Amino acid sequence: MKKRNKYRHHYSDDSLGRTNVRLLEAALSLKHRFFSIVALRRGLRRLRKWTLILLLVIPVVAALIWGGMTAVEKAYSLSIDKISYDARQKLISKEQAMQLLGIEGSVNMATLNTDAMVETLEKNLCIESAVVRAEFPDTLHIEVNERIPVVYVEQETGTDTGNRSRFFMDPKGVLFPVEPEFHRNFMGVPVWYLQYGDVDAFQAGAVINEETRRPIVELVAAANHYTLIEIPAIREIFRPKEWKIIVSLEGGAEVLMQVYDIKGQMERLAMIMEHCRATKRAPRSINVIPRINPTVIYAADSAPDTKK
């Protein structure tokens, strides 16, 4: 019986057998190991294995690198071709908004910072809120909600102190700058002269509390329901006491009102003005607080019409 190699027993196919083969090869000299067919075959197998791995990995890595570079290149080459714009109150034009944002010419989508653009728009106190969003590949959407001027506000002491600063006030009581380029249709709103303490700090961005501003806002809203023929334009508003409002109308008539039932008082004022037109008399002073028989004082040179 042929003698078997003691290193190649029945474990030769498992891990122990492979270990014994390696031990046998380790016992050989470097020269024999170098020219060993077994080692050569093993090396070739390993070489084929790693060559195959490299052939698979290199294209994938190359594709990823190329894709990333292409994406970056495309991103930096994307320019905004369309800008959709909506102003809720139609006070600020698209061109004016672009000027506020400092946008001239093309805008790169990759370098666009929509949060910073919103912050820039809302820094302008004429704008209550703004929304800016980018829509790939080439569209920018901008929406602004402007503040609506209700009245001018000015300090009543301005005539004494010389400080005649004037701001607009919106329905929420926020004071904001007068910008003729935005507010050209609101330059004729009434002036409300503030008493000391009506606002903590007379400056843009300050807010007049609700209880103080409520009757003034209601007054202007009620007046807007009438034509200038029915009720002449309100020019000045004073509130010398918490309960009392004095309104100066176009033509010089003064109207005494209270802070309650503004709508009812304006209805009485409209009826009085209609009577004045019918009798061709000019009112000088009107008290619309009484619900029955409100009083009217006419101008001295005003006489009732006696014609039938």
Image: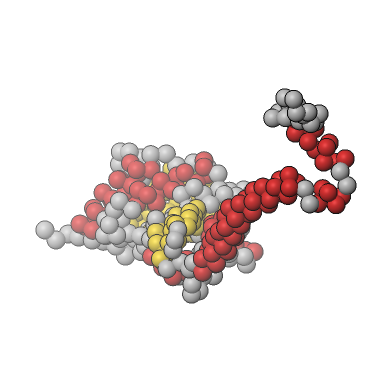
Tell me the quadrant of the picture where the N terminus can be found.
top right
Q: Is residue 304 visible?
A: no
Which residue, as the protein is rendered here, is positioned at the far left? 308
Residue 241: x and y in percent read 53, 45
Query: The C terminus is located in which quarter?
Result: bottom left
Q: Residue at x 49, y 47 (%)?
A: 172
Task: Name which residue lies at 43% across and 43% down.
Answer: 258
Instruction: Give the image location of residue 9, x and y in percent.
Output: 75, 26
Residue 72 position, x and y percent, is 56, 63
Q: Nearer the viewer, residue 150 or 35?
A: 35
Residue at 47% x, 57% y: name it. 134
Kindly indicate the quadrant of the structure image that contains residue 140.
Answer: bottom left
**34 or 64: nearer the viewer:** 34
Q: Residue furthest bottom?
A: 105
Quadrant of residue 122 in the image?
bottom right
Q: How is the image coloured?
A: secondary structure
Furthest-front residue in this view: 1
**Residue 179 location (% of width, % of height):** 49, 67
Task: Identify the residue at image location x=29%, y=53%.
Answer: 226
Left or right position of 232 against 37: left
Q: Is residue 121 left or right of residue 271?
A: right
Q: Say if 21 sits above or below 222 in the image.
A: above
